Amino acid sequence: MEIHHIGIAVQDLQEAAKPYLELGYTLEAQGQVESQGVEVWMLKSGPSRLELLKATRPDSAIARFIEKRGPGLHHIALATPDIGAELKRLASSGVPLIDPTPRPGFGGHQVAFIHPKWSGGVLVELVEAHS
Ligand code: CO
């Protein structure tokens, strides 16, 4: 599975983007995922993407994350061509899934999160995509 993007929790999208823009990243897409209470800037450089995530509501997962740990690395996202089949396979192996079924993520992708207790404290997101 290739890395689709790395998710970073931020308080200010413009400020947080500055260093990456300086390093040659460009803004690929921006928008909101209303159901998750986040505003997203997707930065891209070659095949690499950084997903900057800002909370739009105090009860969003990103707001709670920043409250507990401060801004910084939030998750890694891995691309899978068939997320439904992958989730089924993982569930049957007893992998603790935060999302047993896919939900809409940024950019029209179907996504699902795996519990970080399974992956050494790293929150893993699966994204249905080819890269
Ligand atoms: Co993500």
Image (cartoon, rainbow, N blue to C red):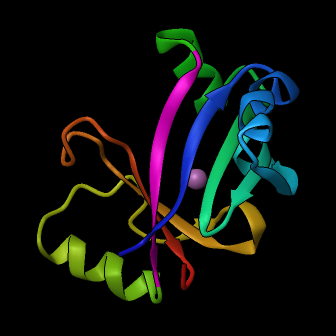
Q: Is residue 56 magenta?
A: no
Closer to us: 26 or 119: 26
User: In this rendering, is residue 25 above or below 77?
Assistant: above
Q: Quadrant of residue 104?
A: bottom right
Closer to us: 64 or 70: 70
Q: Which residues are magenta?
A: 71-80
User: Residue 85's x, y, as percent?
Assistant: 36, 88
> How many numbered circles does the render carry?
0
Q: Is residue 78 found left or right of 62 in the rendered image?
A: left
User: In this rendering, is residue 120 above or below 90?
Assistant: above
User: In this rendering, is residue 22 above or below 49?
Assistant: above
Q: Residue at x 75, y 73 (%)?
A: 108
Q: Quadrant of the C terminus?
A: bottom right
Q: Residue at x 82, y 30 (%)?
A: 13
Q: Quadrant of residue 40?
A: top right
Q: Quadrant of the N terminus?
A: bottom left
User: Residue 10's x, y, as percent?
Assistant: 69, 25
User: Residue 88's x, y, as percent?
Assistant: 29, 81
Q: Main secondary structure of the magenta part?
A: strand
Closer to us: 125 or 29: 29
Q: Is residue 97 found left or right of 53 in the rendered image?
A: left
Q: Quadrant of residue 14?
A: top right
User: Residue 6's x, y, as percent?
Assistant: 53, 49
Residue lying farthest to the front in this orientation: 23
Q: Is residue 78 magenta?
A: yes
Q: Residue at x 57, y 44 (%)?
A: 7
